[in-house]
């Protein structure tokens, strides 16, 4: 039985224990507690995924049934579906904030199921450990980050855009919603839940994880993200009985040695890397879609449960990480957020933590600022604001975007013509007035 299953059993036992004394008081005084809501995935035993309508009813019930949970709208998709944020905490002054992002790719449903039940379990749990965790932690959850894709069963959204390649340009409603959460709530830790297709015999682990590889990730944040993966999430999954590995790395099935890297680079437009550039301890989690042979003969339910349970184990590992390393997390993220104000050092336009940038990808002496003309600012001003990038008027409707700010490295990645995914080619300003 996984830790999460044990917690659910304890919750059910606790609910029953509380109902019995109330019933003993007599019919006039008895008010039995309503059982916590269940997802469509749970009620079907894992035979099918929770529908969007079921999700809406489930989240509404969680919101109404617990004073720890609050459900808000972040916006709507192209097809009019709501983008939801759930906030679960026992204290408005909790010092640590964790964000779970679920279902960016609509055809990867297991992380979404894990996020939905995590919301419910946190909101309704009565044990001392969870109460203490929520007294010091705000857990934010975007249960379905791509509702249109989920409805269609597609990786992309209704605009045929991969949302997880839009965290710089912010052209989609889905990416804009997530950017707003990052800007307004400034989470210390972000866990992004996905699924991957295996490639036997080199790429078949139950669960893979990867930290931000973008080389602009500050050292302390990078170290914490690596620690989250290698010392907490992967060990938690292993203890629950799952095989684990590093995302994007094929390994020899006999020796376990790396064979080749097939994914997991440092491009800044992917949420895993965006979190690092924005000074957050980020982690990508990927569970394997295909069952290992021989396939089971009992339908999809057993393997669907395996997929979800591996995600739940990863979330449990992330929560253990937060519990045990709060001070280190706070120190690393605070130091990184202040470093940009010093405005010194290179900005790297390419490369990764395991792939040094080419000389042409290094801004060894970055400009003081970038100037947007009026037309550029009219097109991209909202996106800069969503990222939390500061600018000031510079005459004729233009704007000056200084590098001396918390998100220093993000400015050239967005505005320098040499950056791979820049949104516009702004004019470098060597010296500021």
Image (cartoon, rainbow, N blue to C red):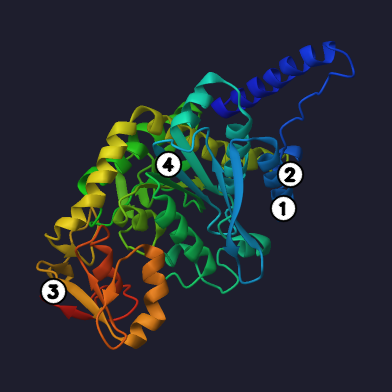
The residue singled out by tag 2 in the image is: 40
Decide: few, some or many residues near mark 1? Use Cα within 10 Å; few <14, some 14-19, many ≥20.
few
Nearest-to-viewer mark from 2 and 3: 3
Cβ atoms under marks 1 and 3 closer than 8 Å: no
**N-terminal of the two: label 4 or label 2?**
2
**N-terminal of the two: label 2 or label 3?**
2
- Could you give the CA–CA distance between mark 1 and mark 3, rounded to whole angstroms? 54 Å
**N-terminal of the two: label 2 or label 1?**
2
- Could you give the CA–CA distance between mark 3 and mark 4, rounded to whole angstroms? 36 Å
- Could you give the CA–CA distance between mark 1 and mark 4, rounded to whole angstroms? 28 Å
Secondary structure beneath label 2: helix
Q: Which mark is residue 51?
A: 1
Nearest-to-viewer mark from 3 and 4: 3
Q: Which mark is residue 112?
A: none
The answer to whether 285 appears left or right of 5 in the picture is: left
Secondary structure beneath label 3: loop
The answer to whether 220 appears left or right of 179 in the picture is: left
Residue 319, given in percent of the width and then of the height, sits at 45, 33
Cβ atoms under marks 3 and 4 closer than 8 Å: no
- Could you give the CA–CA distance between mark 2 and mark 3, rounded to whole angstroms? 58 Å
Question: Which residue is farthest right?
Answer: 27
- Quarter of the image with the C terminus is bottom left
Number of dots carrying numbers: 4
Residue 381, given in percent of the width and then of the height, sits at 38, 75
**N-terminal of the two: label 1 or label 4?**
1
Q: Is residue 138 visible?
A: yes
Nearest-to-viewer mark from 1 and 3: 3
**Residue 73 vs residue 204, the one in the foreground:** 73
The residue singled out by tag 4 in the image is: 97
Q: Which mark is residue 432?
A: 3
């Amino acid at each position: 039985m996984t830790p999460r299953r044990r917690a659910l059993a304890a919750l059910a036992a606790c609910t029953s224990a509380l109902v019995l004394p109330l019933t003993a008081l007599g019919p006039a005084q008895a008010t039995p507690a309503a059982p916590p809501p269940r997802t469509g995935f749970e009620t079907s035993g894992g035979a099918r995924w929770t529908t969007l309508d079921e999700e809406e009813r489930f989240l509404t019930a969680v919101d109404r049934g617990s004073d720890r949970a609050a459900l808000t709208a972040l916006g709507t998709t192209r097809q009019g579906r709501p983008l939801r944020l759930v906030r679960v905490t026992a204290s408005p002054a909790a010092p640590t904030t964790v964000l779970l992002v679920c279902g960016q790719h609509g055809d990867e449903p297991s992380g979404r199921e894990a996020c939905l039940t995590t919301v419910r379990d946190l909101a309704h749990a009565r044990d001392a450990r969870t109460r203490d965790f929520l007294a010091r932690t705000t857990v934010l959850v975007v249960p379905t980050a791509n509702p249109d894709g989920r409805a269609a069963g597609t990786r992309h959204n209704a605009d045929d855009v991969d949302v997880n390649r839009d965290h710089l340009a912010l052209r989609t409603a889905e990416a804009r919603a997530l950017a707003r959460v990052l800007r307004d709530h400034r989470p210390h830790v972000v866990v992004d839940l996905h699924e991957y297709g295996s490639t036997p015999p080199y790429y078949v682990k139950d669960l893979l994880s990867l930290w931000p590889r973008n080389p602009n990730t500050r050292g302390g944040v990078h170290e914490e993200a690596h620690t989250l993966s290698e010392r907490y999430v992967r060990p938690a999954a292993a203890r629950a009985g799952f095989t684990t590995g590093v995302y994007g790395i094929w390994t020899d099935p006999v020796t376990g040695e790396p064979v080749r890297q097939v994914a997991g680079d440092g491009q800044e437009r992917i949420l895993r890397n965006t979190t690092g550039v924005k000074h957050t301890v980020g982690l990508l989690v990927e569970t394997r879609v295909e069952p290992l042979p021989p396939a089971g003969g009992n339908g999809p339910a057993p393997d669907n449960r395996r997929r979800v349970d591996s995600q739940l184990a990863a979330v449990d590992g992330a929560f253990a990480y937060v519990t045990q390393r709060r001070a280190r997390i706070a120190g690393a993220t605070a130091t990184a957020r202040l470093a940009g104000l010093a405005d010194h050092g290179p900005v790297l336009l390419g490369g990764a933590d395991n792939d040094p940038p080419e000389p042409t990808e290094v801004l060894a002496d970055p400009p003081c600022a970038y100037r947007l003309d009026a037309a550029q600012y009219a097109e991209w001003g909202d996106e800069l604001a969503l990222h939390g990038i500061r600018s000031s008027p510079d005459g004729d409707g233009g704007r000056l975007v200084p590098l001396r700010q918390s998100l220093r490295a993000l400015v050239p990645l967005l505005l320098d013509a040499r950056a791979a995914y820049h949104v516009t080619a702004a004019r470098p300003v060597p010296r500021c007035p």
